[in-house]
Image (spheres, rainbow, N blue to C red):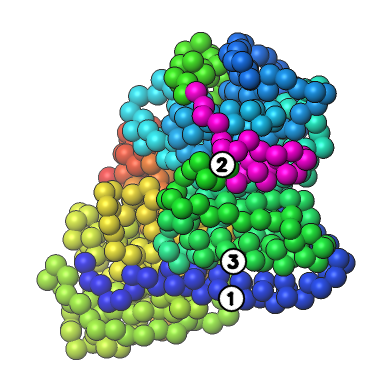
Amino acid sequence: MIRQGYQHMVLDHYVDRLRSIRSERAERLAAVHTKADALAYQTHAREAIQAAFSPRPEKGPLNSRVVDVIERAEFRIEKVLFESRPGCVVTANVYVPAAINGQAPAVIGPCGHSGEGKACDLYSAFGQRLALNGFIALIYDPFNQGERDQYFGIPERECVSGCCAAHNMMGKQLELLGEYFGMWRAWDGMRALDLLLERPDVDPAHLGVTGNSGGGTMSTWLWGAEDRLTMAAPSCFVTTFLSNLENELPADCEQYPPGVVGAGLDMADFIIAQAPKPVILLGQTFDYFDRRGLKTTFAEARQFYSVFGAEDNVANFIGPQGHGYSIHNQQAMLEFFCKQVGRSAIDPLPDVELFPEEQLRVTPEGEVVKAGAKPIFSFIADTAGEMASSREQLTGTPLRAALADLLGLPKRDAAPHYRVPRPATLAGDTYARYAVETEGHIRALLRKRLVDRSHAYTLDVESNVLLYLPHACSQEDVQDDPHARDLNRPEALYTLDVRGLGETGPEVHGGGGFFQPYGMDYMMHGQGILLGEGYLGRRVHDVLAVLDLLVQEGAESIALFGRGQGAVLALYAGVLHDSVTDVTVKNAPLSYHDWLSVPLVAWPSANFLRDGLRTLDLVDCYRELAGRIHIIEPWDASMQPVPEAAVRQQLAEHGIEDSALLA
């Protein structure tokens, strides 16, 4: 593949954005001198956090029950089931001190990304140690961990064989509904807190949260979003959003709360939101979550707490090891929590019993779905169906306005500037190359197939233009895809790699190539979520800006040909740009609704239109393009061909002319 130094373009664009936002935020923090200033700052932070952690369902009955108890001399373990929402069953172990005088302080423990969930030795250990120090500790299984496999019984489920991959599968489907998987995770924690507060032996004045890694994530988010908590100890997660981005550290989908960075927040603001309540930030010397960011967050929080005269209420401890809730961090957590409730922690930490996973099991066979729970993909499918039945069919100007709003398109005042890098040879053809500056330092790479190589240093646009939008890389498509190779029409052929695709994509390392689950494409999509702007929308913007340029330089009519991911871009650009006279899509999805009607979807996250199904679906774009849309070999949710009979039936159901389907 031709590489001319564009591999880090998108990453550097986002780094610049986040640095600018952090600089503006630093000025706002520096202006906080009085309690009134601090409360105003907190109000903004809390509003942004609440917006990210929404929508929230109504609280229904927990339907909790203790199914068994493990008795030990100094504590007992209650095996508990509860429903965080009707049919959504959560499995938990509650560690209860043997002797409680009145009411005891309580702690919820969201687990990190261990397959065993609450039965992981590490999480059982800190649950036991909390109980031995006089706390009631509720450790619960996250989705697709422990007993909560949401895909139990589904064949060919390798793509969700690990809990992180499963979380990201759920997360991208929820995006189409305008929901955030981190809120589903947080809601489990909020309902776990409800469960504790139903207990007469729990002291509501002393409620804590602690967890490590992914559990550190949820401890941080819950601390910012749940006012009833009185103390927190997130471990091995807190740093800065900028540190993770600069270090090219992709996060799980629940670690990208929508819009918080766009609102000017950083991780420290989740801590600051609850000032002056006590919190200790735990890390490790050799953690992959950058300790520099942790120290920065601690310094910012401590300075903010000092305005309340409570700087001693925020503490920091960095253990001597790599990523993990080591004995050192557990000791620091217990000492801090014990201090808040007026007691001394046991020193040294007591040894704990290692329980087999089966012994801590709550359901008969260790599977909530097998025991009758409703899997998350069924919730998603039901909501998608409700949206489809109530959604008004949009056409014309209302459709275009709604689509532009959902995509979050930047304003385009004029055709963009372009550079003319050196030409390139591909499959025996010479291509002129144009780096089109679509936004800041972002450049979309436009190529033109030439007959005369001497024309490679100028942009001379014909009146009739064909623009090809690839699945992942225009160079690969032009060489490997038979339809792309055969585009020898009279119209001039241009190809376009929008941001993050083809020549503008990063070097690919590890298995899976471009489509690896935690690749740079996934990570850049996550940055768009944090900023409250869709990565998909920015790619559509690149196409529209290039169309503006082609029109300015002489194009009177433009035909689009998009394949796979490029087909999604072609559909949107065809609806939104007046100069597009013809759209051909190959390997396109026929509807987003199809992606939510099945448990597993292979399409990358960057193709999911956030909150799209509330207002429209891809079928609306097909209808809008009636008479100028041509469809070749559509793909299903697994990115596999849809049988022709099924395609014709689906087109008919949506009122799309059968003649649009090409062989």
Tell me how far mark 3 sits from mark 1, CA to CA. 17 Å
In the image, the segment drawn in magenta is 332-353
Q: What residue do we see at 40% from left, 45% from top? A: 603
Determine which residue is flagged by label 2. Answer: 330
Q: Amino acid at mark 3?
A: Thr
- The x, y position of residue 151, in whole percent, is 45, 27
Looking at the image, is 567 positioned above or below residue 370? below
The residue indicated by pointer 3 is 296
Q: Quadrant of the C terminus?
A: top left
Q: Quadrant of the N terminus?
A: bottom left
Element marked by disc 1: helix
Residue at the (63%, 62%) spot, across then down: 298
The 10 Å Cα crowd at callout 2, few under 14, some 14 to 19, many 20 or more, is many
Which residue is located at x 68 percent, y 19 percent? 98
- The label shown at residue 20 is 1
Amino acid on which the number 1 mark rests in the picture? Ser
